[in-house]
Image (spheres, rainbow, N blue to C red):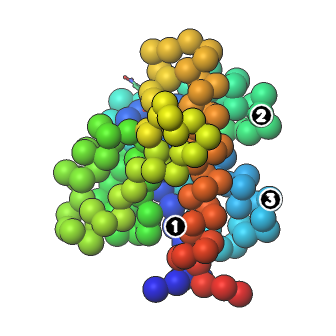
Amino acid sequence: MPVDKLKILFVCLGNICRSPAGQGVMQRLVEQRGLESRFEIDSAGTYSGHQGQLPDPRMRRHASRRGYNLTHRARPITSDDFEHFDIIVAMDESNRRNLMQLAASPEQQAKIVMLGHYIVKLRTYYDYVPDPYYEGAEGFELALDLLEDSCENLLNDIINNKLQNQ
Ligand code: 4NP
C-alpha cells in the first residue's frame, strides 16, 4: 500500500561510520528532489558502545569533502524502532542477521532490507557496504561511493513503488 510519508532507518554496527553517512546521503537526495516532508530518515547501531558520539572523525572528514555535514549522535536500535520505521536498511550481512534476531515478528523482519541490493555501479565487486572502521582513507571513500549509488537507487524504488503519488 503506497503511503504519504515513509520512515527509513539506516543501521550498521557502531552507528558512527556507515549508517550516519547513509542517513546524510539519503537526506540530501530527498532534499534535492524537494521531498523532505515525505520522509523521516534516521540511523542507529546494533552495538551501543559509541552511544552519544558524533560520527567517526574520518567519516566526517571524507563526507564533508562531498558536502555532507554529519551531525547525528550514535544510538543503539530499540524495539520501538522496529515498530516506528517502515524500512530498516542493513549495511552488511552481519547487520542483517543481528536485525533479524532483534525483530519481534515476521512483519518487523519484513521491514529489513540489504542496502547492497541497490548497488549498481560496483555491483561486480560489492553486494554490501563494507565496514571502513579498520581501513584507511580508501575504505571511507569506497563506503561513500557505495552509499551514494545505492541510496539513489533505493530512493527511486521507494518513489516508484511505495510512496503515494501527489
Ligand atoms: P560502523 O563502523 O558500523 O560503520 O559504524 C564501526 C564502528 C565501530 C566499530 C566497528 C565498526 N567498533 O568495533 O567499535
Tell me: 19 left or right of 151: left
As drawn, the label of residue 32 is: 3
Q: Is residue 13 visible?
A: yes
Earlier along the polypeptide chain: callout 1 or callout 2?
Answer: 1
- Which residue corresponds to mark 1? 7
Secondary structure of residue under mark 3:
helix
Q: Quadrant of ligand 1?
A: top left
Tell me: 104 left or right of 139: left
Q: Is mark 2 within 8 Å of ligand 1?
A: no
At x 25% / y 44%, what residue is drawn? 98
Q: Nearer the viewer, residue 40 or 72?
A: 40
At x 59% / y 27%, what residue is drawn? 142
The residue type indicated by label 3 comes to Gln
As drawn, the label of residue 120 is: none
Q: Is residue 15 visible?
A: no
Q: Residues within 10 Å of mark 3 (few under 14, many from 20)?
A: few
Q: Nearer the viewer, residue 104 or 90?
A: 90
Q: CA distance from mark 1 to mark 2?
A: 25 Å
Position of residue 118 measured from the top left corner of the image (x, y, whole percent): 52, 51
Position of residue 30 measured from the top left corner of the image (x, y, whole percent): 71, 61
User: Foreground mark, 1 or 3?
Assistant: 3
At x 41% / y 33%, what residue is drawn? 14
- Which residue corresponds to mark 2? 66
Position of residue 51 measured from the top left corner of the image (x, y, whole percent): 43, 36
Q: Is mark 3 within 8 Å of ligand 1?
A: no
Q: Is residue 95 above or below residue 85?
A: above
Q: CA distance from mark 1 to mark 3?
A: 18 Å
- Residue farthest to the top, as pictured: 136
Earlier along the polypeptide chain: callout 1 or callout 3?
Answer: 1
Discs 1, 3 touching: Cβ within 8 Å = no
